[in-house]
Structures are given as C-alpha cells and as structure tokens.
Amino acid sequence: MKACQGNKAAIYIPIYINPSHDSSILKCARPRSRARRSDLDRLCDSPPRAPSALPDRLVKSPTFISEKTYKPYSSKRPSTSRTYLSSLSNNHVDIDVRDPGVKVKQEKSSLMDQEPAFVDVTKDVPGLTVWRLEGKSRLIQTEERDIGFFHEGATYIALQINEDGDASLHYWIGAFANEDHKTVIEEKAHELDRIVTHAAIFSRESQYHESSCFMRLFPDGIVYIESKPKTTVSRASVYAKRMYRITGRKYIRAACSEPSLEVLDSEAACILDGFPRMYVWIGRHCNYALRNKAIHVAKRIRNLQREGISHIIVVDEKDDVMNEAFKKKLHNNTQFSEQTQCCRPGDVDPENADRRMHRVSGDHVMYNMPEAAKPPFYQRYLVQRDCYLMDRGARLPLYVWVGSQAHENEILYAIKRGKTFCQHKQYPEVIPICRIADDSEPNDFKKNFYDWREKDTKHRQLKKLYSIGNIERALFSRRDQRTVAKKNELWSSDTLPDGEDETEIWKIDGDKMIKMDNDQHGIFNNGNSYIVLHRIRTGSFTQQVLYYWLGSKLENDNQDSVLDLVLSMNKTLNNQCIVIRVFDGREPPHLMSVLGNCLIIYDKELEDSPDVESSRMFCIREHDPENCSMRVQQVPVTPSSLNSSAAFVFHIPSQECLLWYGQKSRGSEREYAKQMIGYISPLSKFDYSIITEGKESKYFWNLIGQKQKYPLDFHIEILDRRLPRLIVCCLNKDHISFNSIENFQQEDLCENEIFLLDLYDQIYVWTGSKVVESMQRQTPVCLKRYIATDPAGRADETISVWFLTQNNEPDSFTKFFPYWTSDGISGEKSYELSRKLIRQENMKVDIDKEMVDRTYFGRTKYSYKDLLKRELPEDVDPQHKEHNLSEKQFKEAVKYPRDQFYRLPLWKQEQLFKSARLGHTGASENPYRLRIESPENHNQ
C-alpha cells in the first residue's frame, strides 16, 4: 500500500493476506521496532479515543488497566476474541489466523447443529427447567410433576432463570450413570451455557454430594429413584416396596433403598412406599423440622407418583405397638450398599479443611495454578481480570471464581480446570465443582473472606456525597464514612424498648457476687468482671437484660466461669433474660445508656502498685457521639499513653491537675475532662492548668517522661455487618458440628435444638424451650467451637454475642425472620398438627377406587410386534400404545396384569412402558432443519 502523501511521517497498515487470494497485492514494509509484534496483535489494536469516551464501569474500576486489554464479563458485551472475529467478518476480509499462541474455537454455523431441546430456551422467561438424557444423546424435558425426582442411573441438566435474568445452570450425574452419559451431559451443559451467555452459577453435581447452589433450586427436596428411566423389561418388572431414607435439613434428600431394619436410624426419618398405604417412620431423636419435612415428602410422593390415591400412616418410634408392627413389614435384606449412603449434614469438619486459593490461567496444575493466598482471605485478592480456584478440602465444594473482566477462555474452561485440579489432588470424583461469576457469589463462598462487602449494584445505587435525597439514610459501612446507601432493617442498630427501668450491678469475686451501691454504678476495674441486670417495664410486659462485662486483664479461665454463673442466674429467672456478652472497650450504646452514658475504668496493675498515690493519668474520649457517652480509662503515666484524639487528666496529689488536649479531641471531651477533675481530685476542681498538643513545656515532659511518639487515633477493629446466616448446632457424643440453613424461616427453628444466627459482627445464640439440661450446658462450648473454626478467621473479642431463649426474642432478632408468629417454631405442637391433618386427608382418599385406565375399552387390538413397528395404524396413539393391547399381550409386554400395573408408582409405570418400547421413542427432529440455512451458505 502507498504511504500517505503530504505528511513527513508515513503510515503503514500491515495486513496478513490469505495465500489463497490474489498474490499480486503488495505487502507493506514492516516498520522497525524493538519488540516484535504479531499480525494478530496489530489487528486487535483499537483506535485511540478520548478518556471521556471510556465506559463508566471501566473508568471507576480499581483494576482497570487499558480499554483494549480486557473486556468485561457480561451478557451484553462479548469477549475480546469474539469481538475480533466478528469485526473481521463485518469487513469481509479473509484472514488466516495462525498465531500459535491463540486458540480460536469454531462457532456453530447455524441452528442445525444445536440441541433441539434448547431451541426455545430464553432468559426472558423466569423459571426452572430440567432435562434428562435418554438414549445416547437425546435430551427430554421433564414434566412439572417429575421435577425433583432423579433416577440413580441417569443424568440431568437444570436451568434456573430468576427475575433479573440471571441464569443458574447445573448438570447432575447419578451414582450409577455410565461414562458415556457423563461425557454427553457435560457437553450438552456447556452448549446450554453458551446459549444463555454464560450462567452466573454453573456447577457439576453428583448424587448424594450436591452443593447448596443446586439444592436451593428444589425447596421441596429431591427424591432418588432406582435404576434408569429405560432398562430391560425383566429388570424393570422386578419391583417391591421401596424405602426412602430422609436426610438433610433445609433441603432434604430422600434416598431409595431396600426395606431393611438396617436403614432405620433414631435420628432420621424413613418412608416406606407401598399401596394402598405409605408409612412415615420417625426416629426417637429426630428433630421436629425433619419430621415435618418427611411428612411433606410423603404427601408429595402420594400426590405426584400415586395420583393422590394412598393413605399415609405416621409411625413414631416412641409408640412401641405401631413400631413393632411396622418392623414386621421389613426384612433383613441389607442391599443398601455403602456407595449409596447419604452424607449427613454436619459431617464436614471445617477445622480440618486445608483452605487455599489458586490463581488459574491454564490447564496445568503445577504451572498454571499457583497458590495465590492462604487464610485469612481478603476480598481484594480477587482481581477482576483473573480467575481463582478456592480449595477447601476433599469433602467441600470446589469454587472457581471468574472476574468480570476475565477472558472468555477462563469462563469456558473453568469446570474442566476444576476437574483437572481434583484429579491432581486425588479428590473424589463426586466433589461438586462450581463456577461463579463476579457479584453472584453464594454465601458458602463469601463466608470464607474476612472483609467481604456486598456490592449489590443491581438493587442499590451507592453515592459518595450527602445530598438532600439521602441525608436521612444510614451509613452502609461502619469504616468507610463516605459510602452512603439506602437504609435497610438488616443494618439497623440493635436497640432495646423504652420504659421504666431498674438496674442492679454485681461484682464477681471468684465464685461470689458482691452487689454494688448505686453510687458505684459505672465504675469498673479491668481486672474483674461485672454482671448488670436491667429491667424495662412497658405496660404489663417486663424485658430483662443480663450484661456480663469482661475486663481486658481478666484471665481466660475466669471468663468461662463467669458465663456459667450468668446462665445459672438466668435459669433462676426462668430463662426470661437476654444475656449479652460485653468486652472491655466494646460496650454497646444501650449498655452505656444503662450506666448513665459514663463509664470509668481503673487499671488493675496501676491500682495494685505501691506508688499509686504518686501520680495518675486518665484518658477521656467520646464512646458514642450520638448519645454523647463518655469513657474514662486509667492509663500508665508515660508519653506513649497520649493520643491526639482524646483529652487527658494528669493528677499529682501534691500539685495542681493538668489537662492535656489533643489536636483532634472534641469539645465535649474537653468539657468532660474538666468535670472529671472534680471526681478525681475535688480540691483541684478550680485549680488546674490546660496544655494543648504541640505547646507542652519542659516541665510537662519532666513530669510524665521523655517525649516519645504516640498514636494519633484510636484504632479499634470493627466488623461490618453481613447478610444473616442461620446455623444449627449438632451435638454428638464426642463431636460438635454445624450445619448452615439457607433461606431460613421461623419454621426452621426447633424447640429441642440450639441455633446460631450469625451477622458476622454479632452472633445470636438461640436455645429452644425443650433443650435438655445437658445440652444447655454445652451452649458456651458450641459458641467457642464455632468461632474457633470460623473460616473467615474472626477474633473472639470483635464479635458481640447475645444468648436468647425461646419465647423471649427481642425485635432485633425476630426482624430477620419474615412473618414471625408466636407459634411458628417447629416443635411438638406443629408435629402433632401435621399428623392430625394427615389423618383428615386419609379420610378423604378412597383407596378402593378403580385405578385401571379404562381407555383401552373399545380400542382395536393389535399384536405387540405390530405396535413396535415405525409405521403404526391410524387409530393408534403413539403416546399410549398400551391401549391397543389385549389383556394377555399387556401382561406379556410389561410382566404385570393391568390391575396390578396401575398400582405401581407413576415413575415405575413410565419405566416399564419405555423398557417395553410402548412409549414415544422416536428421535426428536430439529424443526428448523429444513428451513434455516447456514449464514455462510446464505452469504455465498
């Protein structure tokens, strides 16, 4: 090409020409440069533009490097490689990309090669869709009544579209699925992932080891069905009563097994599926939430698989007569193999999990997956343009996080690289692998980070400056004073009701409680602990609050004894108190209000020193600006004790008092320091000197010591509040484990268990009214164990702890449970009510009703062989060929007479029809195959 005329500097445009085209075109001379660049790099360069033309999302991004390096991971903007290829096709230039460092994946030319089941898939219609793989590569969309029922020998794909258009995609592999089906279902899932423009959550799931991301798609639980949807007639015809073992908590699993005494467990529930009755066996120590769930699953099986014609009998292990009669229906055939047993909730020990974070950039574990971070994890470790893998051991899901500006290859090969990593670490094949996109992380992923902050860019618009529209809104963050967001009840401060109050305070001296006089309220020593009982009367209701304050220099052994003393004191008050743990220096505003908005703390070591009367120094700072509460702390008389953000009182008995004001101290602190002189030294109330920071004399430094560096501010670590998480404590004989409950409601609380409501900066310890005394004594142990095994690595003193009991919950606790009612907690009352409703429903079900489908009357009868032909007679319905069989032919085909066949569950009937080839088995054809041409052929 010719250089531009009229300019001193010539401009060359190098283009790589395909050899198949006209070779007469002259090649441009390559300008000299120090770094050799490929032709692909030159073509990928975009023309420069003004900084104002950059997208706001990239300009504000802290990880933004340049506008041409990375493209954001979004459904509206394609990746860099695809943008490059599309730009070439628009310019109609044939370019042969032969750069060895670039891998270009061939795009599908038309809808001809697309899976027919995905033709109507769109992100505009929210809802859940499930497909099942049948045959070699044919996907069948499951009916609505079959959603949640999974064959152990099959593979499935589940796609959930929420109201915002975000997709959650999962492919599920049964325990007895063959290798060919595993490979095909993975390819189909990745094809669907490309159709929905990369789902926000994409995971590989295995039977009995499903992740919480998959389980929450099925709020009614999942039921495992034996065998495959289609098998041989001889295998499908062998059917007896089946027992389902119910496990889980919020999202339960019903595992199919042979009826046997070995399946029964006193802490679980089982369902014996038979006709005309279904039996729900409840273990003696089974929690009430699982009891109600088991009854709900039995009703679901009855309605969806028995067409509502079955009686449900609830058998409680405590009822000896019914229990013995139920056991007679079982046999000791223990074919329930170890391979198919469910993992119970709480089996995972987070303390033994070795957590690591790896940066993923290729398929080689040793070279392309280096270790990026060790615990504790911080959110800043996740760079937007990279991909990271979180390894938490062989028994927890593996997460692959993809940044919003990551390359498209990082998205496409995330699951594959996760599988490679598991093979390298020799992890089980059934471990879930979840690919999660930026701003779509599940709670199970976010809980591993110490400083995770919700972006919530979809529903909340953050602002950096106050304005008239948001001046009344509360701060979203406690550390970033510039960030303002719309106030939500979730982040509101914890308050107590107003009313007539009464306060009593005791000082703990060993095992003794010494009551303090009213004039000594609010005067503590950091070497002791104190109990504050505060009563608030509002009408006829009295709210009682028990604070126990722990000094900073109190021994750890004494802290446990104080908690035991407080809990025993609460027991004497009929467990009607809210017990709140308070550490020295972290007093909540409501406690400061109880103490008169003033707290004076003496130092244990300085009080015991012999020269205590020589000189004393006190630090006065404002603890809560909203309530104007003051905190007075005795500190050592050294220059290092000074702080620019406080006022200090320096008292020498033989001389006058000195007031030292820091440059950052508030006016309220300075005025309160003057009032403290009257308390510390009444004789010097009007005889004192004021010294401001930076104007100290030599006399001042001679009194407190040689001038040294001192802090400018008070650095107190304060945790941000997060979305609440409900955790149930599972207390075994020698082990304590925890099970998280997602999307919790009031019915998830049980009156015979202990729960933790974790807000990250605060933990509520809730104890049911029917918890035995031995479990109540383990409450402090559960709390200590939970904090010690916290994956985020929080310190114990940074967490505020409230101990609650059933029927005495404050509003600050109940606001996290929608539609809170006085009788909404699961317990014996709700359990007996469920049994009563079952008995009433049984009275309405007629089990003697004729179940045989009489549609076959009047139909022309054909032989079984004629119905297997591809060309059927005109009066034969391809979906119901069984109606054209005689009684003898029907029994020979499915091995059951009609009256016994229609008593089987619907899934077994469909399995027999498919195995006998009486169902619709024709290959589905792409409806677009005949009228849609390839875009390439159309252009040609």
Image (spheres, rainbow, N blue to C red):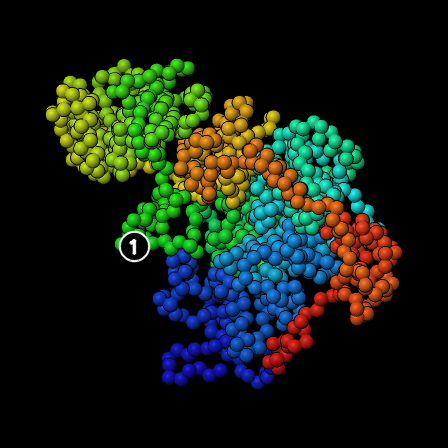
- Is 688 rendered above or below residue 372? above
Q: Position of 80 compared to 131: left or right?
A: left
Q: Give the residue type that dot 1 points to.
A: Gly
- Whether residue 230 is visible to the viewer of this picture, yes or no, is no
Q: Please name the residue that numbered disc 1 is placed on.
A: 469
Q: Taking 243 as reference, is 852 above or below it?
A: below
Q: Position of residue 643 (x, y in %)?
A: 26, 34
All told, the count of numbered labels is: 1
User: Which residue corresponds to the image point at 55% horizontal and 50% vertical from the top-left?
Assistant: 400
Residue at point 61% right, 57% down?
Answer: 129
Q: Position of residue 795 (x, y in %)?
A: 44, 34
Left or right: where does residue 134 sit relative to residue 652? Answer: right
Along the line of sight, the residue nearer the viewer: 357 or 75: 75
Residue plotted at (29% across, 54% down): 469
Please tell me whether mark 1 sits on a helix, a strand or a loop: loop
Residue 432 locus on image (x, y percent): 62, 47
Residue found at the very far left of the displayed protein: 686
Q: How many residues crowd around disc 1 within 10 Å: few (fewer than 14), some, or many (20 or more)?
A: few
Along the viewing direction, whichever of 927 and 899 lies nearer the viewer? 899
Residue 252: name its quadrant. Answer: top right
* Residue 192 sits above or below residue 653 on the image: below
**In which quadrant is the C terminus drawn?**
bottom right
Residue 508 visible at all: yes
Q: Residue at x 42, y 54 (%)?
A: 459
* Residue 319 percent location from the top left of the image: 67, 28
